[in-house]
Structures are given as structure tokens and as C-alpha cells.
Image (cartoon, helix red, strand yellow):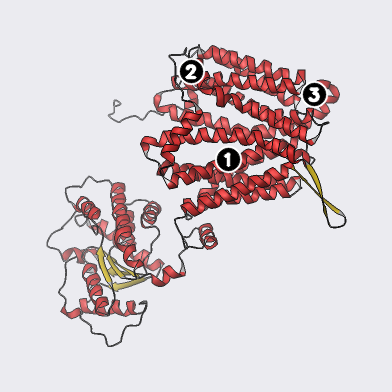
Amino acid sequence: MTASGRATRRKQPHVLSFPSFRRLWVSMSLCSLGDWLNFLALQALAVGITARSSYTAMGLAVGGVLAVKMLPAIILGPVAGAVADRFDRRMTMVVGDLLRFALVFSIPLVGSLQWLLIATFLVECVNLFWVPAKEATVPNLVPRDKLAEANQFGLLVTYGSAPVAGALFAVLSLISGPLSDVLPVFENEAYLALYINALAFLASSVIIFTTRGIPRGGGRVSTPSVLKQIFEGWRFVGATPLVRGLVIGMVGAFAAGGAVIGVATLYVKALEGGEAAVGVVFGAVFLGMALGMFFGPRMLRELSRRRMFGLAIVAAGLALALVALIHNLVIVVFLTVALGLCAGAAWITGYTMLGMEVRDEIRGRTFAFLQSLVRVTLLLVVSVAPVLAALVGKHELQVGSESVYTFDGTNAVLLVAALVAVVVGSLAFRQMDDRRGVPLLADLLAAVRGEQYVTETEDQTRGLFIVFEGVDGSGKTTQSRLLGIWLRDQGYDVVTTREPGATKVGMRLRAILLDSSHQGLSPRSEALLYAADRAEHVDNVILPALRRGAMVVSDRYVDSSLAYQGAGRVLEMRDVARVNAWATGGLVPDLTVLCDLPPEVGRGRFASPADRIESEPQDFHERVRREFRAIAAADPDRYLVVDATQDMDVIARQIQDRVREILPDPVAPGAEDITHTMPAIRD
């Protein structure tokens, strides 16, 4: 507390404001950028070295590079992680960066495929020591409450540097040509990228060496093997059909993506694109994934997540099929963005559902299992795809009398990958579809418009939903019961209900909401409690009745929250509307009857205030009435506003006349009017 007695709020420091972590983060950024550059350059160099050989030789060279790049992590990962933690972490990272610098720098100097494979394998072995040292260091450089933010920044540079590396590789490939005229050492387009990669590792070693806040290693850390994680994880995943479908779908999508990664360089070369084109296509994939992760779920909010997951994988497969068949590099780049967009939407949707569906006690093992299975899948597919492309070879197909269509191994692999994605996506869609019977295209178009699709059958079989609203004492409870009796007298199945308190959970919430002793309840808590009661009300009372064709008459609904919590409590109306739309699933009444009455008249009908809401001051209830009237005026076709100062029988007849207009079957004009037999019921 300050001297004036006011509490001061200390601004929370940003995670990058901690000097040691900031320096480590810069080092991580350089290394991630270097790794992605290395990934692209090694494939390009393998193709360049074998360019004068056969198409099969190029495919085998690329497959070999990718295999030796991923193999160490599968075989030696757990061992290296345990051993690395025994050494001084700072020196482990410094020495690792220096070794990576020397190995990468030597690749263009030697210029042979054999040394390229050996050096790549050794670099990946060094990575197995560098990464655990880095991961173990981060928690010691930031406060515990900043660790999640620090991990987010780590993931940002790990994956966010990929499109940057793709763009940089394209630029370096463009300038390496003119540069090679001056310096023959850059005769291959990939050499400049490898030298930049090596310098990134060297700069990282200097930064780490001059960072003094990195502690020495501790005791041994035990890391289970990848295969053990897979076997243990499948026991949990296999027991739940939904989670099993999600995992199969995500792994299948990664298998298709691995095929694209494996033959991307060969395919771009077949389209007569240079190293710059390889970088552009590579960056296009990650640009599309970023767009899909961000915009996909936002554009299709009303589409079921389960449907979106399978649909996105199928769409990615179709985009991939077009990539395989169209021999135009510009079109391929745009299709690659579309492919990445669909893959990104599927990935973020699948991850979200896994987080929601898997129990907390096994969630960590499930995600570890998924990541391990993805690594193994990528290793197999990325290694095998170029080899299969090489075995298929290159063929020329005669199309008509003059045209020739070239079909090679990359086309075949991409088509197979597209088929896998379509099949896996279709299986996931069929297994997890939670809206069976709803046409997919109509559901999708409605979601694009921001609406939820309702079938004609649902409209035909759905009953009628009528709501009564008004200030306290307006007679709405009496009129809702009278209308229910009148509808039953016409032969309809009728459910009369109320809010809050129509369910067992609702009765408990009603006791909290209306208890006069709970005067300290915050407005937002009150709004959320009403929304919780409404969600139970809709799911357990209203919707089941409507689905069997019943007439549902409810005393209060969403408009009461808009009026009482929005206007009365002066909350943001948009927030109140949004949380209630989510709670009700967007269910809107067919007719809302507003019993309009001045608040002082309504309160005068009570001997004393009966609950917490009725005890609010006069200006509160005036705001509530004004909001009710404004809501009704904005949609006059769906509202009936009645003067609640009239006689009870007069009001009842006005309501019956309006309800006759919307009843599914005509009501006989001579039907008995029984309203006069009902006594007034206190609201």
C-alpha cells in the first residue's frame, strides 16, 4: 500500500526482459533459422551433386539425406538426453554450436555426397546434446510464472523461422549466381545458404559463451524411448474411439505431409524451378499452415469441430492431388498455400479436441505418444518417399497427337499421399461426425455465413417455442400458465417452464441468484450463473420437448439477461449476448410476449420485495424496462408487446390471437376460452 492508502499495481515484466533468457532466445532463433536453411540446402545440394546422374540417383540421394537427418533422434535421443544433463550446460551448447559450425562449413568445401551424408548424421547427433541442454536451461532463466510464456517464445522461433528460412533461401539462391562469377566457391546455389547456416551456429556459440547466467547440469534425467512411448500411449488412445480417430487422422495427415517434404525438391526441379523456387514452395507451406491455424476455426465457428477436422484433411488431400497433376510452378505455389491452410486448420482443430476430450491424468502421455508416433511416421515417409519416386522414374505420356504429359515418381508419390489424406480424412469424418443426417455442403455454407444449419425435417418436426418477458410484477408468469392451459385445451403437447430453476441444477442456481443474502455477487458472476442455468434448461428441458414436437412456454429466457444483467447491471451488452448465445446453442424463440408495465406499478403489486432482484432500486428497474422495449422494437415480427395494465382476460385473448397465427395446425375459431376460470398468480 502507498502512503495515500491506495494499492499500487506493479507492471509484470516481459519474459524477454530477463537478460540471460533473452540471449538464449536469440541463440535459439539463430539455430532454428540455421536448421531450416540446412534442411533446404542439403536437399538442394544432394540434387545438385547427382544432377548429371539419373533421376533415380537424385531420388536416392535426397532420401538418404533425409534419412540420416532424422535417424539419430529416433535411435539415440533418450540416451543423449540423459548423458547431456551430466555436463556443464553452457559449455555443452557452446561446444555443440562450434561442432555444428565446423561440420556444416565443411560440406561445401568437400563437395561429395558421401561426406554430405556423414556430416549431416554428425550434426544431428550433436543436436541431441544441444537441445536437452537448452530445454533444461530455460526454467532456470525465468521465474516459474513466466515459464509458459518462455516456452511459447521457444515454439515461436522453432516453427516461425521456417517461412523466414524459405524466403531467405530463395533470396540467397538468386544472388548466388552472380556471386559465383566473382567467387567460384559459391558455384552451387546451395553453398551460400550452408555458409550462412554455419555462421549462424558460430554466432550462437559466441552468444552462449558470453551468457553467464546458465547453471551447470544437475542429476541424470531419464527419458523413455520413442518406441516405449508409442506402445504405452496406444493403450490409452485405443480405448477411446474419438481420440483414436483423432490420432489416426493427425498421423495420416503428417504422413501425407512427409511425402510432400520428401519429394518437394525433386518436384520443383522437375518443374524447371531453381533453388529459389524450392524456398518459395517451402515457405508457402508454412505460410498456409499459419493462416489455417489462425483463420480456419474463426471463419467456421458454427461448423462442428469434429466435422471440420475430417473435412480439412480431405481438402488438403484434394489440394495435394492438384499439386501433383498441374505442371505450372506459379499455380503449384498457390495450391501449396491452400494445402498448408487446410493442414493448419486440421492440426489446430485436432489438438484442441485432444485437449478437450482426453482426461487430465493421461493428457500428457497422449500428447507424448502422438509426438513420438509423428516422428516415427515422418522418418519412414520422408526417407521412403524419394526412394519410391526414384524407383518409379520418369515417363512421358502421349496426350492427343501433339501433346506430351510428363509423369514421374514425384507425381506418383504426391498422388499416393493425396489418396492417403482423402481416405484418412474420410474415415475420421465418418467416425466422428456428430451431425449425421445434416447435408455437409449446406452445413458448410451456413457456417461460412456465420449461421448454424437446421434441416427441413428438424423445422417440420420441431415444436413451438414461446417466451414471456417483462419486469417483476408484470403478470408474465400468470399469462404463461394461462397460455399453456389454453394450448393443452386445443390438443397440443405443452411444456410450461421457467427460468431460473427448471432443472435440478437450476434450482440450486436459483437459490443462489435470488437469495437476498447474496448481495455481494458480482454482475459478471450473476450473468454467468444465469447463463449456466439457461444452458441446462435448453439441453434438458426445451430442446427435448421441441424435438418431439411439443409446445414450450417459458417464463423468461435470454432477453431477461440482456435487460437485467446487460442494462440493469450495466454490463457490456455484446458480452452478455455472446455468452448466452453459446449457452443456448443459438436457440431463438418463435414468439416472445413482452408484458409491458411501469416498474412502480409492478412493484406496487407486492407487499414487500421477495428476492434479491426485486430489492434493487427504482432506477435499476427503469433501465430493465427500457431495454425490454428496445429489444422488442428491434424485431417487431417476433415480439408481441401487450399493455400489462389491462385486465388479465383481455391480455390473455390478445396473446391467444397472436399465437393462433403461428400454430402448426389451425385452431377452431369456437374453441372454449377458459381464462376467466383462472385466478391471478403472483409473479
Q: Residues within 10 Å of mark 3 (few under 14, many from 20)?
A: many
Mark with earlier residue (1, 3): 3
- What residue did someone put label 2 on? 82
Amino acid type, mark 2: Ala
The vertical placement of 94 against 52, above or below, is above
Q: Classify mark 3: helix, strand or loop.
A: helix
Viewer-nearest of discs 1 and 3? 1
- What residue did someone put label 1 on? 254
| Residue 631 at x, y percent in the picture | 37, 64
Mark with earlier residue (2, 1): 2
Mark with earlier residue (2, 3): 2
Whether residue 32 is visible, yes or no, is no
Q: Classify mark 1: helix, strand or loop.
A: helix
Residue that protrudes farthest toward the bottom in the picture: 670
| Mark 2–mark 1 CB contact (< 8 Å) | no
| Residue 562 at x, y percent in the picture | 34, 57
Residue that protrudes farthest toward the right in the picture: 402
Q: Which of 100 and 464 is in front in this view?
A: 100
Amino acid type, mark 3: Phe
Q: Classify mark 2: helix, strand or loop.
A: helix
- What residue did someone put label 3 on? 186
Residue at image position (14%, 74%) is: 679
